[in-house]
């Protein structure tokens, strides 16, 4: 019965005919967009009419895009759905091209004219942030014709990721694995995520090695796709006169490059805490040597057992109680109103996400729910995004509702922290609390240290392309292995990382997003700051956090956080995260000592 639960895409379009009509209408509006270029925009009224038409088109496109991508993600094997998604992407490229003249024209108007227009035309108020931001980006905008060319090519820029998605989700010949009790499992992404937590170490090892062997068999193709993505990204940064791809990636949202540099420096300073966590894990599992395939199995007594989706939703509702009744009620509404597609199916996109571009409807959450605590954490994570978007969309006008990823992962990771804190409080026995605490510690490892490792690799990968090197399969694998072994303490004996797993880079879709992963780590540093205050009941802490969510994209994200006391270009937030993590490790060590020899089943022992 649970497997029949789907999201309700009829909220977007009641029928395929409705979608087609909306698509054709936006095609017409897009074709008319270029006609606006003939206007002077000298008067405040003309400037308002132009930006209103532009943002109105973007608003309509967001709804079409969510529908097309959601339909495709329901079944990536369906060629008709893929064609529809590509058609919408193509329309998005044409829309961008049709309006590519607007930022250079605003720039040509100049600051004084724009400010006079804002003062004279009250209807321009929702667009003030956009107009001033265009002026800020002036040095990196190209002439209208060149901007149009880049916009037209944006569809081509998506080809590497489209190739990656089709190959890895629909075409990879994943092997079958027979489990100890005779169950035969197709070892795809969803099965691997489940089996890497298996209590039998031999199953974990076999699953990991055979899973990554599949990627290794196609690593040349995936390296070619990744090289194309990085090369395109670096080329556009160079054309826009940025000093590096990193600078080009961070500039649009005014994030200082010092944030990226500070993250890598501070995360490396905190590696002793990570290695301490690995040693604690090794002891808890009763192993002589921790290996790569031991990094996900929980330790302690699983008092929660299999967790049906309904129970997971109730756990999350209880966990977010410190955020107040309005937050809880909005979450309850989303659960009951068809916002989520929770369960895995053949052909369905793996992983999880929240799509929030349908401003006039509601966010859509995709999961591949497995019924374990890790899946409950993913539920908490993605619904953090969904409620963030719902609050921003209900508070902000469309032009300032959308927020960048730099802020997005704060809401998601804070929900995970609240979840684990709540679950820990519910369980009376040390072994049971240790189980939950092991997930919270994994939350910090996976979201902070693992993403910092990815960011380190990604930065080095872009530097190689900027210096004229090609990202061949062996180059990527060698580079990734070097970073992987540094961050996992291979040479210090913390985690044994065999050669089999150096191809893990080919498994990570976020490398096709362009300097995306670092924001998970910076966001966890920020959300830890807020979570500690909220859980401690500090006066005003909840209100300040909700204020951040409701702000959407109304200001630059780095500035919003600085106003709330979190400067991610300084060492302090990362040092605060380190102190919090050290306290969790102290607690885990005390619980492990209290548990004594009552550890995981002997199947985990080498």
Image (spheres, rainbow, N blue to C red):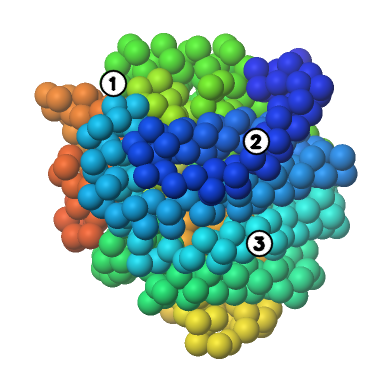
Q: CA distance from mark 1 to mark 2?
A: 45 Å
Q: Quadrant of the C terminus?
A: bottom right
Marks 3 & 1, CB-CB < 8 Å contact: no
Q: Residues within 10 Å of mark 2 (few under 14, many from 20)?
A: some
Position of 85 with respect to 446 (left or right) is right
Q: Residue at x 49, y 74 (%)?
A: 239
Between disc 2 and disc 3, whose residue precedes?
2
Q: Which quadrant would residue 194 be assigned to in this image?
A: top right
Work out whether 183 lies above or below 493: above
Answer whether labels 2 and 3 touch (C-beta < 8 Å): no
Residue 196 visible? The answer is no
In the displayed structure, 599 sits above or below 66; it is: below
The x and y percentages for residue 497 are 55, 71
Q: Which residue is mark 3?
A: 153
Would residue 330 be seen by someone viewing this image from the given angle? yes
Q: Secondary structure at mark 2?
A: helix
Q: Secondary structure at mark 3?
A: loop
* Image spot of residue 29 (x, y percent): 65, 35
Q: Is residue 92 left or right of residue 346?
A: left
Q: Residues within 10 Å of mark 3 (few under 14, many from 20)?
A: some
Q: Quadrant of residue 261?
A: bottom left
In this figure, which residue is indicated by the disc labeled 1? Answer: 322
Whole-percent x, y for residue 145 in the image: 57, 64
Mark 3 and mark 1 lie on one chain; the one further toward the N terminus is 3
Please tell me the numbered disc located at residue 61: none
**Quadrant for the N terminus in the image:** top right
| Alpha-carbon span between mark 3 and mark 1 | 46 Å
**What residue do we see at 76% from left, 44% from top?**
87
> Which callout, 1 or 2, points at the residue further toward the start of the chain?
2
* Residue of label 2: 29
- Please name whichever residue, 336 or 424, is drawn nearer the observer in this view of the structure: 336
Q: Name the outermost residue toward the bottom.
A: 468
């Amino acid at each position: 019965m649970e497997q029949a639960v789907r999201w309700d895409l009829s909220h977007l379009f009641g029928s395929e005919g409705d979608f087609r009509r909306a698509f054709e209408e936006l095609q017409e509006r897009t074709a008319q967009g270029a006609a606006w270029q003939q206007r002077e925009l000298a008067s405040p009224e003309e400037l308002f009419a132009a930006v209103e038409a532009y943002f109105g088109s973007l608003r309509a496109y967001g709804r079409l895009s969510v529908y097309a991508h959601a339909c495709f993600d329901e079944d990536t094997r369906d060629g008709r759905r893929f064609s529809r998604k590509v058609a919408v992407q193509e329309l998005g490229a044409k829309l961008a091209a049709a309006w590519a003249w607007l930022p250079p024209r605003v720039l040509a108007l100049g600051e004084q004219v724009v400010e006079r227009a804002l003062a004279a035309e009250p209807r321009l108020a929702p667009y003030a942030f956009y107009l001033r931001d265009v002026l800020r980006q002036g040095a990196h905008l190209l002439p209208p014709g060149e901007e149009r060319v880049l916009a037209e090519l944006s569809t081509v820029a998506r080809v590497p990721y489209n190739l990656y998605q089709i190959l890895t989700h629909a075409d990879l010949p994943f092997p079958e694995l027979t489990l100890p009790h005779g169950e035969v499992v197709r070892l795809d992404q969803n099965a691997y995520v489940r089996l890497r937590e298996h209590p039998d170490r031999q199953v974990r090892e076999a699953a990991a090695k055979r899973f990554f062997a599949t990627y290794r068999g196609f690593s040349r193709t995936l390296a070619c796709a990744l090289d194309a993505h990085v090369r395109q990204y670096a080329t556009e940064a160079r054309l826009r006169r940025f000093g590096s791809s990193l600078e080009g990636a961070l500039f649009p949202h005014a994030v200082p490059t010092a944030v990226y540099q500070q993250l890598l420096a501070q995360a490396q300073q905190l590696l002793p805490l990570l290695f301490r966590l690995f040693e604690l894990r090794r002891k808890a599992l009763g192993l002589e040597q921790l290996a790569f395939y031991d990094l996900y199995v929980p330790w302690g007594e699983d008092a929660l057992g299999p967790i049906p989706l309904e129970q997971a939703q109730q756990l999350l509702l209880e966990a977010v109680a410190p955020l107040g009744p309005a937050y809880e009620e909005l979450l309850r509404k989303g659960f009951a109103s068809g916002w989520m597609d929770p369960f895995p199916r053949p052909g369905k996109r793996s992983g999880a996400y929240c799509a929030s571009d349908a401003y006039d409807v509601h966010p859509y959450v995709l999961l591949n729910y497995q019924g374990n605590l890790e899946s409950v954490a993913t539920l908490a994570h993605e619904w953090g995004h969904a409620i963030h978007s719902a609050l921003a969309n209900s508070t902000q006008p469309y032009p300032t509702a959308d927020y960048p990823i730099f802020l997005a992962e704060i809401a998601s990771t804070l929900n995970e922290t609240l979840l684990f804190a709540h679950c820990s409080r519910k369980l009376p026995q040390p072994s049971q609390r240790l189980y939950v605490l092991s997930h919270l510690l994994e939350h910090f490892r996976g979201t902070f240290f693992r993403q910092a490792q990815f960011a380190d690799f990604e930065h080095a990968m872009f530097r190689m392309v900027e210096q004229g090197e090609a990202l061949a399969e062996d180059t990527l694998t060698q580079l990734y292995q070097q970073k992987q072994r540094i961050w996992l303490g291979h040479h210090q004996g913390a985690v044994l990382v065999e050669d089999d797993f150096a191809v893990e880079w080919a498994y990570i879709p976020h490398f096709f997003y362009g300097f995306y992963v670092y924001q998970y780590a910076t966001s966890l540093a920020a959300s830890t700051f807020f979570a500690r205050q909220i859980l401690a009941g500090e006066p005003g802490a909840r209100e300040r956090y909700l204020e951040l969510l409701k702000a959407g994209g109304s200001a630059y994200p780095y500035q919003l956080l600085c106003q709330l006391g979190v400067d991610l270009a300084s060492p302090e937030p990362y040092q605060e995260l380190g102190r919090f993590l050290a306290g969790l490790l102290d607690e885990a060590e005390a619980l492990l000592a209290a548990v004594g020899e009552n550890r995981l089943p002997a199947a985990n022992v080498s």
